[in-house]
Image (spheres, grey):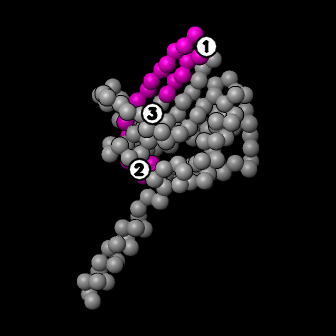
Amino acid sequence: MKYVLTFLFVVLLENASARTITRFRDSESLTVMAQFLFDSSEDIPQPIRLSDKKINIKDLNKCSSVSAEHVYSDVSNSINKVLRFYPDEDLPFEQALTDLEDYLDHRTFKKCIFEKVTPNFTLHTTYYRDQKDQIHVRLDTTFL
């Protein structure tokens, strides 16, 4: 009985500290914020899009290592840029940041930057992935 209780305690303790958000769709507030950025992208000078879509990177040596706090700050600043154009008090901004913090899980990330230049626009992509390739954050900014 002593071993059963010890086992249950360990399992419950591990579950209590486990991440509850493993992708953006697990968080309604993150999904709402990503959709808000997408919907407003037609109407602002530098549209920003947020997603957790994975990018296959062949050479991670060109990427730099950053903390979860850096990723959090970058996403927060990007959302704030759009909110300056379209302030909306009904958006779950604070909850989205709380959920993002849970999603990032205080890990170390690789930060990769890509640019695609066309005659009409430049697409600047900042992509973050954790060392285990389980967590992905992608910020696309378009310069017209």
- Pick the residue in front: 69 or 142: 142
Q: Earlier in the sequence, mark 3 or mark 1?
A: 1
Residue farthest top in this picture: 119
SS state under label 1: loop
Q: Quadrant of the N terminus?
A: bottom left
State whether residue 46 is above or below residue 82.
Answer: above
Q: Specify the quadrant of the image occupied by residue 108.
A: top left
* Magenta portion: prevailing SS class: strand
Q: Nearer the viewer, mark 3 or mark 2?
A: 3
- Mark 2 Cα-neighbour bin, 10 Å: few <14, some 14–19, many ≥20: some
Q: Position of residue 65 (x, y in %)?
A: 35, 35
- Pick the residue in front: 66 or 118: 118
State whether residue 44 is above or below residue 107.
Answer: above
SS state under label 3: strand
Residue indicated by mark 3: 127
- Pick the residue in front: 73 or 20: 20
Residue farthest bottom in this picture: 1
Q: Nearer the viewer, mark 2 or mark 1?
A: 1
Q: Amino acid at mark 2?
A: His
Q: Amino acid at mark 1?
A: Asn
Q: Earlier in the sequence, mark 2 or mark 1?
A: 2
SS state under label 2: loop
Is 104 part of what is drawn in magenta? yes
Residue 138: image tag? none
Is 17 on the left-hand or right-hand side of 10?
Answer: right
Residue at (66, 51) in percent of width and height: 92
Residue 120: image tag? 1
Residue 106: image tag? 2
* Stretch of the chain drawn in magenta: 103-125
